[in-house]
Image: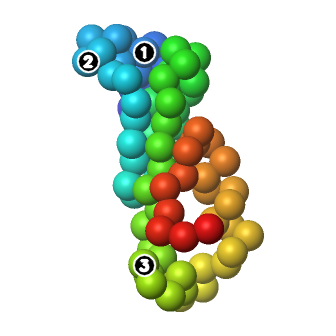
Amino acid sequence: MRSKFYDTNWAQNFLELSQARVLCFDWIRPRKYVVESLLKAAKAMYIPTVALPHGVFLYTNDFVQIGSKKEGQFDRYNHFDYVIVQNR
């Protein structure tokens, strides 16, 4: 149902009506909820997208979740224009 009703057209209408200038996500799962539709619409409308990674300790840069891998982190954020982190 989600993919039928909350597609890219819905997301573009939503972004236009809200007059969004930037999209910011703090819990990123592009294939879950409506994130993927919003990302596609924002890209088509030249609206910048920002990711705020979840699951990294601020001072040690260690992973919070057991089984997290560095390689998987980068794949998750390739959909965004900017990734805000606390260090390099």
Taking the spot 62% from the left edge, 68% from the top edge, the residue there is 88
- Density class for disc 3 (Cα within 10 Å; few <14, some 14-19, many ≥20) is few
As measured in the structure, the alpha-carbon distance from the residue carrying label 3 to the one carrying label 2 is 32 Å
How packed is label 1: few (under 14 Cα within 10 Å), some, or many (20 or more)? Answer: many
Q: Are marks 3 and 2 in contact (CB under 8 Å)?
A: no
Percent of width and height locating residue 82: 55, 45
Q: Amino acid at mark 3?
A: Leu
- Asked whether, in this view, residue 80 is left or right of residue 24, the answer is right
Q: CA distance from mark 1 to mark 3?
A: 34 Å
Return the disc, 2 or 1, that comes first in the chain's sequence: 1
Q: Looking at this rendering, what residue extends furthest in the left direction?
A: 18
Measured along the vertical axis of the image, is residue 39 above or below residue 42?
below
Query: Could you say where residue 17 lies in the image, as x and y percent from the top left?
Result: 27, 11
Q: Is residue 85 visible?
A: yes
The residue labelled by disc 2 is 18
Q: Identify the residue shown where x is 55% and y is 19%.
A: 46
- Alpha carbons under labels 2 and 1: distance apart: 10 Å
Is residue 62 depicted above or below 40 in this figure?
A: below
Way the structure is coloured: rainbow
Q: Nearer the viewer, mark 1 or mark 3?
A: 3
What is the count of numbered marks? 3
Amino acid tagged 2: Ser
Residue 58: image tag: 3
